[in-house]
Amino acid sequence: MCAASGESTTIPAKRVLGLDVGSKRIGIAISDPLGITAQGLETLQRQNKRLDFEKLAKLAHDYEVAEIVVGFPLRMSGEEGIQAEKMQIFAEELRKRLQLPVHLWDERLTSAEANRLLRETEMSIKRRGQVVDQMAAVLILQSWMEHRAQTNRMPRDTARNDDQSEI
C-alpha cells in the first residue's frame, strides 16, 4: 500500500524459465517472481518434440512465465558448433510455439560446475545424476539474471552479433 494515496503498489510477477537442453533430458529451473533467484524445478525425460514442448508450455503457463532462457552450447573457443546450431533451432521453435521471448545464454562449463557442486553434498551418486541437469539449468538462469541485474538491461543474446536479445 502506498501510504500517501492508499493505492496498492505491487510489482508485477515476471518469472523466467531456465533450460539446460540435452538429447535425453531437459533440466528446468524457475526464477522467483522478481527475477532475482533461480531454483531447480524438475528434470524432463525427453520423449519427442511434441510432448516435450507440451510439457514446457504447461510449465510456462502454470508458473506464469514471461520469458525463457535456454543454455547455448558454445565451444570453449567461443565458436558455435553443431550443438549450438541445434539449440538455435530448438529455441526458435520454442519461441514460436509458446509465444514468449526466448534467450540463448552461454552454458559453457555449467554441467561441470553443477557436478562439482553436487559432489560437495552428501547426495548419492544416483540422486546426483537425477538432478545435475536441473542444477545446470539453475546456473544458466542465475548467470543470465545476474548479468541483467548488473548491466541494468537485458543481456545481449550470446547467439547474436547484433543488439537483439531474443530469438
Image (cartoon, helix red, strand yellow):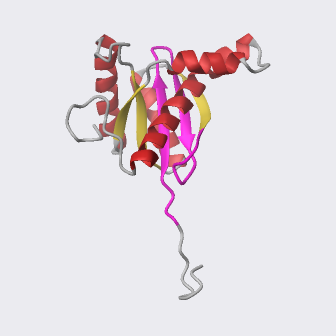
Quarter of the image with the N terminus in it: bottom right
Q: Position of residue 11 (x, y in %)?
A: 51, 65
Residue 35 picture location, percent across and down: 51, 49
Q: Residue furthest right?
A: 122
Q: Residue at x 75, y 21 (%)?
A: 121
Q: Is residue 163 left or right of residue 42?
A: left
Residue bounds of the magenta highlight: 11-38
Q: Measured from the top left, where is residue 123 in percent x and y? A: 77, 19
Q: Nearer the viewer, residue 91 or 114?
A: 114
Q: Is residue 45 above or below residue 18?
A: above
Magenta run includes residue 20: yes
Q: Which residue lies at the image location 57% right of the left edge and 87% below the top edge?
A: 6
- Give the quadrant of residue 104: top left
Task: Tell me if residue 121 comes above or below residue 93 in the rendering.
Answer: above
Camera-side residue of 13 and 141? 141
Percent of width and height locating residue 151: 39, 47
Magenta segment: does it hold 107?
no
Q: Does residue 146 appear in this view?
A: yes
